[in-house]
Amino acid sequence: MVFVIVLIRCLSFISFSHAQSTTLFDPLRYVDPLIGSAKDGHVFAGATLPYGMAKAVADTDSEENQAGFVSGNDTYNITGFSSMHDSGTGGSPSLGNFALFPHTSCPNNDINRCIFPKAQRKKAFDGNSTVSTPGYFAVTLANKIVVDMTASHKTSLFRFRFPNNGSTTSSPLILMDLTDLQDSRQDNGSISVDSKTGRMTGSGVFKPSFAAGTYTLYFCADFQGAAIKDSGIFVDSRASAVVKDLLISRSINGSPLPGGAFIRFHNPGDQPILARVAASFISSAQACSNAEREIPDFDFDTTITTAENAWRSKLRPIVVSKNKINSSLLTNFYSGIYRTMVNPQDYTGENPLWKSTGEPYFDSFYCLWDSFRSQIPFLTLLDPKEVSRMVRSMIDTYVHEGWLPDCRMSLNKGYTQGGSNADIILADAYQKGLTEGIDWNRGYDAVVKDAEVEPFDWCCNGRGGLDSWKALGYIPVQDFDYKGFGTMTRSISRTLEYSYNDFVIAQMALAMDKQADAEKYIARSSSWLNLFKDDTPSFINKTINTGFVGFFQPRYLNRTWGYQDPLKCSQIDDNPTSVCSLQNTAAETFESSIWEYSFFVPHDQAALITTFGGPQAFVRRLDYLHDKNITGIGNEPSFLTVFQYHYAGRPGLSAKRAHFYVPQYFSPTPAGLPGNDDSGAMGSFLAFTMMGLFPNPGQDVYFIIPPFFESYTFKSPATGKTAKVRNINFDPTYEAIYIQSATLNGMPYTKNWIDHSFFTQGKELVLTLGRNESSWGTLLQDLPPSVGTYVGFNGTAVSRRPWLERTGKIERSVEFGGPRKSWGGVMQPWT
Ligand SMILES: *[C@@H]1O[C@H](CO)[C@@H](O)[C@H](O)[C@H]1NC(C)=O
Ligand SMILES: *[C@@H]1O[C@H](CO)[C@@H](O)[C@H](O)[C@H]1NC(C)=O
Ligand SMILES: *[C@@H]1O[C@H](CO)[C@@H](O)[C@H](O)[C@H]1NC(C)=O
Ligand SMILES: *[C@@H]1O[C@H](CO)[C@@H](O)[C@H](O)[C@H]1NC(C)=O
Ligand SMILES: *[C@@H]1O[C@H](CO)[C@@H](O)[C@H](O)[C@H]1NC(C)=O
Ligand SMILES: *[C@@H]1O[C@H](CO)[C@@H](O)[C@H](O)[C@H]1NC(C)=O
Ligand SMILES: *[C@@H]1O[C@H](CO)[C@@H](O)[C@H](O)[C@H]1NC(C)=O
Ligand SMILES: *[C@@H]1O[C@H](CO)[C@@H](O)[C@H](O)[C@H]1NC(C)=O
Ligand SMILES: *[C@@H]1O[C@H](CO)[C@@H](O)[C@H](O)[C@H]1NC(C)=O
Ligand SMILES: *[C@@H]1O[C@H](CO)[C@@H](O)[C@H](O)[C@H]1NC(C)=O
Ligand SMILES: *[C@@H]1O[C@H](CO)[C@@H](O)[C@H](O)[C@H]1NC(C)=O
């Protein structure tokens, strides 16, 4: 049975790509949704549409089942087939609500001899039976039940094929469990089954994965394919075909009490039984109407085809050359892109929190601290229409809840990891020209509120410590903050992130002609300097001197310095007891070291380079960060560090570093990701890196390295124009990865970065490669913009401050650097 289904899927695949090969490039051929579904990738491996709310997959009992299914380990069992998931996230397993589970029959046809509770009923499965393609997932249980599934936007369609052993008395059973992946169900779950139609409706209250509140989810399940024998409900291990409605408490001990409903069928023979399951955050009635509208006639194949076409049209704008390269690279690339559109999820029409004024509602921004760095910027390129809708949703969340979202899931405010990251996303979208339906005045109000007003719950939106921030220019360790509440750690990483948040607000202000605001926020964006202590050394294992002196350090309210080992919370931290996440006892840097955070001054690399002792010293430090395994590519703060060589006039070293990490740390296998995919953040890192254009998020800047392909074309969905990038002397062994010269639209181009108009105006970049670094992109005039002035570079000084140039007056704002001297006695880099 398995093999039949696998074969059918493969055949349709092959025939499609064959038929299309001469006409259309089919990117779906290169999407493997199982990448990142093993170990701690936590990638959702099942069936979904782009940004789909329905995410159907088999749930396993792995400890890494944050997204339900975990592959690559024969010891895992399948606990059920549920419809709601997130992808790539950390935290507790997310969603996984309302699992279905099949039994071939109950022993002696006695309903009470079927096993209902999740912990006991779970079944092993054949790992080699797993098939996953965009919009489709299949697996075979050890008892030979074959289950495959597909999804529309809010509805999952499951297909169960029971082994037909010829017995006419065999009565397969499908149960619906009022459960979720993390066993968080609260009082009062409910379920009803209609004995005539078999329709099941109900709801449950559950906890979000990484937030404090609860959410209520409703569902509607319908079945088709065989005559109904009987139906009823179960509680714990007992069931009854007489009782049709259940209201169940959580119960007080351990996991919630098992409860749900079942339906039994007369022997379906070889016919599959279909289960159509829709969820809604509004009501069961809405779930039912969603299901009836989206999949009216249970047409499995059409639902797959619709999903495939949706994915195909999303991926189609990027066409890469297959010339000379191993197709595993293509799989890495397109699968990475695919994952950028699994989360966030479009819950428009399903938001019970406020009355809709017609704005979209997106959820599963989990977390923007991960997504701002390259995922949302990637979507701004590939799917600007949807990013506009996401931005509208963020602004609408601000309008109704008072604050932009930061780490939102399941209708709740999740825990903020650092800065007010939505500021960067809004600024990025604003500068890249997204306008469609966005009220940018409101968007601006929202980011300014983040900068000016401290929320009572800065755990979960906005920023904390704003009084200190404004008065001192840094977040003090052990701050005095009586106005709002959140975990009082991360003083260094928050200072760095707030500095950048203020910078991106300044850019928006400038573009909106808000001169005074622009000056104010540019000045505040240099606050990072207040935590730089120029005599702090760094030792590995307390004995081996790294040779680098001068690091960010914690600072008290009274302006004296505290101390944190610069390697604490790095990958070579010698202290096994370091606590590095959101715990109350955690470090002053979030999930990362001072070493790595040292580079997080995305707006003023010129000043940072000077602070670190000039371009050569900066490069040595960046090399040390990577070569000594201090930074971890499996977590997002590392992303920008791969490309920061550009600012030191060494773009070739960024290319070299990109190849150091890709594909070695990102292979197109289930266990191939270096860490949590984080809603597609890792996927976007791969996609941008392999395209050879990586963004500095929040700025209109893409760093240029050679693409990993001989060439590609990108057709902008925003303008319909096609941009092209081509490597001359392309070397598939990747030894010739150094740009010797470049042309843009046929004219020599020496800047080592390019702006967004490259994509929207359909320009052509041609790169000539060689085996050694060259002088291309190394001169002062070639460097990406920076607030401060570059010192120690060859070339002709040009203003590195395009955003400051637009008005003459703003230049004065650098004088704001003056008072900082007295704050910290730190070097004044403005010249
Ligand atoms: C499979 O999972 C089991 C249970 O979690 C674990 O002990 C084992 O190490 C895993 N095996 C592999 C190959 O990952
Ligand atoms: C899967 O179930 C088998 C049999 O009940 C059990 O031995 C095994 O430990 C389970 N796997 C996990 C990961 O719990
Ligand atoms: C597939 O089958 C092979 C050979 O029996 C086995 O070694 C491998 O572990 C299986 N793979 C999975 C994912 O179960
Ligand atoms: C067929 O399946 C039923 C239900 O599992 C079982 O009772 C019966 O013994 C099976 N018959 C054969 C011939 O295997
Ligand atoms: C759960 O239902 C019971 C019985 O109707 C009711 O007394 C109780 O207040 C409900 N609890 C909640 C949290 O709604
Ligand atoms: C392509 O790359 C994969 C993974 O690195 C490798 O196993 C395979 O042998 C390569 N194929 C060719 C034709 O080089
Ligand atoms: C630091 O100490 C750890 C644990 O003793 C050791 O594994 C590591 O190799 C040491 N690092 C260096 C650079 O010596
Ligand atoms: C500043 O505050 C810290 C922490 O409370 C304290 O240890 C230190 O002695 C204070 N320094 C001065 C100069 O008061
Ligand atoms: C780097 O650190 C990680 C995390 O501690 C470890 O898993 C990995 O083996 C290290 N790599 C090297 C090359 O030392
Ligand atoms: C590249 O550099 C190496 C050593 O740095 C040198 O031996 C070699 O000739 C250079 N190759 C070219 C093509 O310039
Ligand atoms: C400037 O040019 C000199 C002479 O060519 C060279 O030695 C030096 O490394 C260059 N400096 C930078 C920062 O590129």
Image (spheres, rainbow, N blue to C red):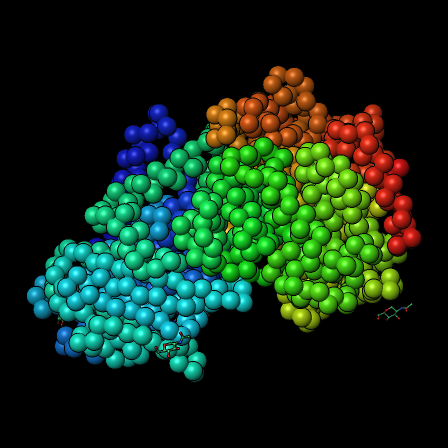
Q: Toward which corner of the image does residue 20 lie, by quadrant?
A: top left
Q: Residue furthest top?
A: 746
Q: Relative to 279, is 448 above or below?
A: above
Q: Toward which corner of the image does residue 688 lie, by quadrant?
A: top right
Query: How far from the left and from the top, in percent, is residue 524?
Result: 78, 47
Which quadrant does ligand 2 occupy? Answer: bottom left
Residue 104 visible in the snapshot: no
Q: Residue 487 or 790: which is nearer the viewer? A: 487
Q: Relative to 714, is 595 above or below?
A: below
In the image, taking residue 45 as reference, residue 267 lies left or right, namely left
Q: Toward which corner of the image does residue 809 lie, by quadrant?
A: top right
> Going 47% across and 57% down the picture, which residue do you hit?
353
Q: Residue 364 or 665: which is nearer the viewer? A: 364
Q: Relative to 19, is 179 above or below?
A: below
Query: How far from the left and from the top, in percent, is residue 522?
Result: 77, 42
The quadrant of the image that shows the C terminus is top right
Q: Relative to 108, is 763 above or below?
A: above
Q: Residue 397 or 300: which is nearer the viewer? A: 397
In the image, taking residue 287 as reference, residue 182 lies left or right, namely right
Q: Residue 382 or 391: which is nearer the viewer? A: 391
> Going 85% across and 58% down the picture, which residue do you hit?
536
Residue 106 visible in the snapshot: yes
Q: Residue furthest bottom?
A: 253
Query: How far from the left and from the top, in percent, is residue 426?
Result: 60, 43
> Going 55% across and 34% down the picture, which residue do you hit?
435
In the image, taking residue 259 as reference, residue 170 lies left or right, namely left
In the image, taking residue 628 as reference, residue 27 lies left or right, namely left
Query: How far from the left and from the top, in percent, is residue 97?
Result: 38, 63
The quadrant of the image that shows the N terminus is bottom left
Q: How many marks?
A: 0
> Going 83% across and 64% down the picture, which residue do you hit?
557
